[in-house]
Image (cartoon, rainbow, N blue to C red):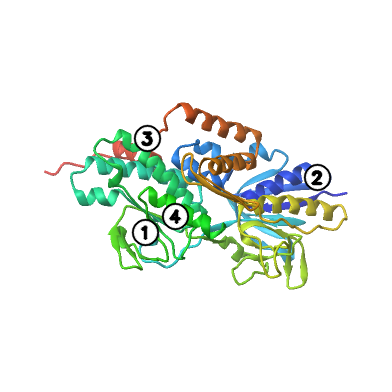
């Protein structure tokens, strides 16, 4: 029996969990698992706000692929084309010529990217919040703005530096806003030149509520808590322009800011445009509840998908509903998909994915949170504790669980680190200046 080759495209929540489960369920005689991703790690995105705020080390919010997927072949590169008719993918490694990889089954899980709009100035001045690099950059940038504000004598420069704008009131935006404000307020103890009221934190949300995944009363509670911290919450408001850092809102307000964070939703990875798989109107890969890719009523044999980039019917709701793009669904879909691939390889029938969304938890800063799980609603410290406990249990590997718990434990006894390491973003600048050839003196 020749082993089947399973190609996993992307090593996010779906790709990593699926590859890990496949490598445990199938022997090497049954299957070979190849994972392709340009990054050497999987980012556990729910921990990005905590990593950005300094509650945990950024290294502990990522999972090294080669350490966890020892029974898999890991290829550091990007899939630039999938020709499923030929059961072939074209992979561009980090360095060197492109290569073709043939497969018997393909798991299409490139995930999602930030969904942006053609807003003037956003491309030049905005920053997303989906990667560990963006989280580290935002932390260093916010702390750097505090240094700028503390050292200047120009009121306009200080006001601009201390104005922080977050666009999007979903979980990513709310948690990033709350954690960063918490960190900055904590850091002000070392800035006698600045007062908390000097800072301006603005949330811009196009709809009339935040946290659409929970009930309206929980969203309203969240807004009330943020406003108690003197945050400027703009609901039913759109960002219309941010050219040269001047934020212009649909309610007519306008002000300068050095920090514009875009967290207004996601869209399927553009990598899917280089495939021949069927897509829906939102450009997601169309799937059956079994996680098999489907073209109309026809199953595309050997093709599977799940997570943010897939339209998976939600069997716990009325027909026409799809699973939300959450880590909760992605992890469970990955497990079901891996089991179904193993079933098919062994000549069995795949099983439908069915999971009723348990609820959501969100951190609003240190010791503050909101949660709605199985209809039970909690706020404050209990919700914050549940948020930490749940995500600690979900991050892959015992190694990462221990490191995260150690970070949290030390934080009870030691003060938060509030130093900016801005040189990380351009480490060659000082050396390039020192090693530049001398300019010839004019005669």
At numbered mark 1, what does the secondary structure look like: helix, strand or loop? helix
How far apart are the alpha carbons under marks 4 and 3? 29 Å
Q: Which residue is mark 4?
A: 223
Q: Quadrant of the C terminus?
A: top left
At numbered mark 4, what does the secondary structure look like: helix, strand or loop? helix
Tell whether 120 sits left or right of 57. left
How far apart are the alpha carbons under marks 3 and 2? 47 Å
Residue located at (35% from left, 62% from top): 121
Look at discs 4 and 3 and give the one toward the viewer. 4
Residue count near mark 3 (Cα–Cα under 10 Å), binned few <14, some 14–19, many ≥20: few
74 and 185: which is toward the camera: 185
How far apart are the alpha carbons under marks 1 and 4? 29 Å
435 and 407: which is toward the camera: 407
- The mark that comes first in sequence, 3 or 1, is 1
Q: Which residue is mark 1?
A: 124
Q: Position of residue 178 (x, y in %)?
A: 44, 47
Above or below for 342 versus 408: below
- The mark that comes first in sequence, 4 or 3, is 4
437 and 104: which is toward the camera: 104
Tell whether 302 sits left or right of 361. right
Residue 211 shows up from this direction: no
Residue count near mark 1 (Cα–Cα under 10 Å), binned few <14, some 14–19, many ≥20: few
How far apart are the alpha carbons under marks 1 and 2? 47 Å
At numbered mark 3, what does the secondary structure look like: helix, strand or loop? loop
Q: Which residue is mark 3?
A: 419
């Amino acid at each position: 029996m020749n082993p089947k080759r399973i190609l996993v495209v992307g090593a996010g929540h779906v790709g990593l969990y699926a590859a890990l489960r496949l490598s445990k369920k199938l022997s090497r005689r049954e299957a070979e698992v190849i994972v392709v991703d340009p990054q050497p790690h999987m980012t556990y995105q729910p921990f990005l706000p905590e990593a950005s705020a300094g509650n945990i080390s950024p290294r502990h919010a990522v999972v090294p692929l080669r350490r966890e997927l020892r029974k898999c072949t890991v290829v550091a590169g990007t899939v630039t084309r999938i020709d499923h008719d030929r059961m072939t993918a074209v992979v561009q490694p980090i360095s060197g010529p492109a290569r073709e990889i043939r497969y018997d089954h393909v798991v299409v899980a490139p995930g999602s990217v930030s969904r942006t709009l053609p807003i003037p100035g956003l491309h030049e001045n905005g920053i997303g919040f989906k990667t560990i690099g963006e989280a580290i950059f935002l932390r260093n940038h916010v702390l750097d703005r505090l240094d700028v504000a503390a050292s200047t004598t120009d009121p306009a420069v200080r006001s601009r530096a201390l104005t922080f704008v977050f666009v999007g009131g979903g979980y990513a935006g709310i948690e990033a806003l709350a954690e960063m404000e918490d960190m900055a307020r904590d850091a002000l103890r070392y800035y006698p030149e600045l007062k908390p009221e000097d800072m301006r934190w603005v949330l811009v949300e196009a709809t009339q509520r935040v946290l659409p995944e929970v009930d309206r009363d929980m969203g309203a509670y969240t807004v009330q808590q943020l406003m108690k911290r003197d945050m400027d919450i703009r609901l039913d408001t759109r960002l219309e322009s941010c050219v040269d850092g001047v934020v212009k809102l649909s309610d007519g307000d306008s002000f300068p800011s050095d920090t514009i964070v875009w967290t207004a939703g996601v869209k399927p990875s553009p990598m899917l445009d280089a495939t021949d798989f069927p897509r829906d109107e939102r450009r997601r890969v169309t799937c059956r509840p079994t996680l098999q890719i489907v073209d109309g009523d026809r199953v595309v044999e050997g093709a599977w998908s799940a997570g943010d980039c897939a339209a998976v019917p939600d069997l716990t709701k009325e027909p026409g509903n799809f699973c939300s793009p959450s880590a909760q669904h992605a992890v469970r879909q990955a497990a079901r998909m891996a089991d179904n691939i193993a079933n098919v390889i062994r000549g069995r029938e795949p099983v439908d994915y069915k999971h009723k969304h348990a609820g959501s938890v969100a951190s609003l800063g240190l010791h503050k949170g909101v949660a709605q799980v199985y209809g039970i609603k909690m706020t404050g410290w209990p919700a914050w504790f549940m948020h930490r406990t749940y995500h600690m249990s979900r991050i892959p590997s015992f190694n990462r669980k221990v490191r995260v718990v150690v970070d949290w434990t030390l934080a009870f006894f030691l003060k938060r680190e509030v130093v900016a390491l801005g040189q990380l973003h351009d480490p060659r600048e000082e050396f390039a200046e020192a090693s530049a050839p001398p300019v010839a003196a004019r005669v």
